[in-house]
Image (cartoon, rainbow, N blue to C red):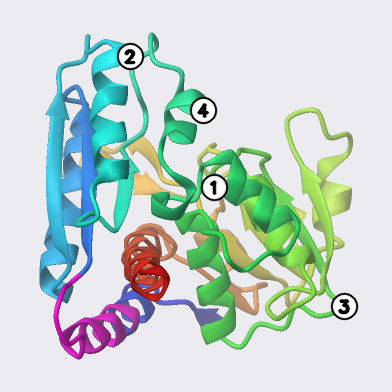
């Protein structure tokens, strides 16, 4: 079994981006982060993104709002960033408070600055296989893991566990596209799928993004299948310093003897999401420069 080291692959991408940014003659890309409230996970994620941007040489702005910010105030900020030529990309950190509609908020970001890939225009471009749009960072990271690990997808059966807008649906579209990685036969499974194990046992590649710890068991996987585990779940662990540990949607230890490739959690898909955000930001910058 080949353990897919997401940290190492993300590091390679960051080094490539750093070289590209350092070679830019004049202006540098800038990404604007918008964070609403003090959700601990959101605070941590945004901080990590800021540090990675700084390491690459990408500028960053942080716009903070209280958890009770009005829709109008938040949208005024997004509109101003949309109009600012110095800002290459905009990321609104999810989740948002319940009084703010996430889809409406993501759609407020101009498509050409939507480096998170959540705007309806960019999702539509992905469906049409229009490469001018931006792909959501986690699915884009999955594609890079597959490509750089030498996993074959053409003519293979890919099963996606989960149908979220952020991971499941775009990952399925990427695996169906007329390109590599892609050209696969894709089945999307979810909470209403009947006889799920019978379907997953047919898969050459499983993308697990269902959000339930150790949901995918060894009995659900055929010998030689590749597993990309997107899940990040907290489970209680009295022996851990924080009282919990992180596990994926796949039972890593049980599946490892059967799998051809397997991503760990943590250290698999997670680091790729940040790396692909930076990739999208540099690309947005280059597109804007080309259109000036």
Q: Is residue 210 visible?
A: no
- Is 45 on the left-hand or right-hand side of 138? left
CA neighbours of label 4 inside 10 A, class few (<14), some (14 to 19), many (20+): few
Which residue corresponds to mark 1?
A: 249
Asked whether the beta carbons under mark 3 and mark 1 sit within 8 Å of each other, the answer is no
Mark 3 secondary-structure assignment: loop
Q: Earlier in the sequence, mark 3 or mark 1?
A: 3
Q: Earlier in the sequence, mark 4 or mark 2?
A: 2
Q: Secondary structure at mark 4?
A: helix
How packed mark 3 is, by other alpha carbons closer than 10 Å (few <14, some 14-19, many 20 or more), is few
Residue at image position (37%, 36%) is: 235
Q: Which residue is mark 3?
A: 155
Separation (CA) of disc 3 from disc 1 = 25 Å
Residue 54 visible within the image: yes
**For the N terminus, which image quadrant?**
bottom right
Label placed on residue 103: 4
**Of marks 3 and 2, the one in the foreground:** 2
Residue that badge 2 annotates = 71
Q: Which of pointers 1 and 4 lies earlier in the amino acid sequence?
A: 4
Q: Which residues are magenta?
A: 13-28
Query: What separation in Å lies between label 4 and label 2 (alpha carbons)?
Result: 13 Å
Secondary structure mostly seen in magenta is helix
Q: For the point 58% across and 82% down, which residue is it? A: 147
């Amino acid at each position: 079994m080949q353990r897919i080291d997401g940290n190492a692959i993300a590091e390679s991408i960051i080094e490539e981006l750093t070289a590209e940014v350092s070679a830019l003659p004049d202006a540098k890309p800038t990404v604007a982060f918008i964070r609403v409230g003090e959700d601990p996970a959101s605070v941590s994620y945004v901080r990590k993104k800021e540090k990675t941007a700084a390491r690459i040489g990408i500028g960053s702005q942080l716009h903070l709002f209280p958890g009770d910010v009005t829709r109008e105030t938040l949208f005024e900020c997004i509109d101003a960033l949309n109009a600012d030529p110095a800002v290459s990309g905009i990321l609104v950190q999810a989740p948002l408070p319940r009084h703010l509609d996430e889809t409406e908020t993501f759609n407020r970001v101009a498509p050409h600055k939507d480096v998170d890939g959540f705007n309806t225009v960019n999702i539509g471009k992905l469906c049409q296989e229009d490469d001018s749009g931006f792909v959501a960072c986690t699915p884009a990271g999955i594609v890079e893991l597959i490509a750089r690990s030498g996993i074959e997808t053409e003519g293979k059966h890919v099963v996606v566990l989960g149908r979220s807008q952020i991971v499941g649906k775009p990952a399925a579209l990427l695996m169906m596209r007329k390109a590599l990685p892609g050209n696969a036969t894709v089945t999307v499974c979810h909470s209403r799928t009947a006889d799920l194990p019978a379907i997953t046992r047919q898969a050459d590649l499983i993308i697990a993004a269902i959000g339930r710890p150790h949901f995918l068991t060894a009995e659900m996987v055929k010998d030689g299948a590749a597993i990309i585990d997107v899940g990040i779940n907290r489970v209680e662990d009295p022996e851990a310093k924080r009282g919990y540990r992180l596990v994926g949607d796949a039972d890593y230890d049980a599946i490892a003897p059967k799998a051809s490739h397997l991503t760990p959690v943590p250290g698999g898909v997670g680091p790729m999401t940040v790396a692909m955000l930076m990739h999208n930001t540099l690309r947005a910058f280059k597109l804007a420069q080309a259109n000036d």
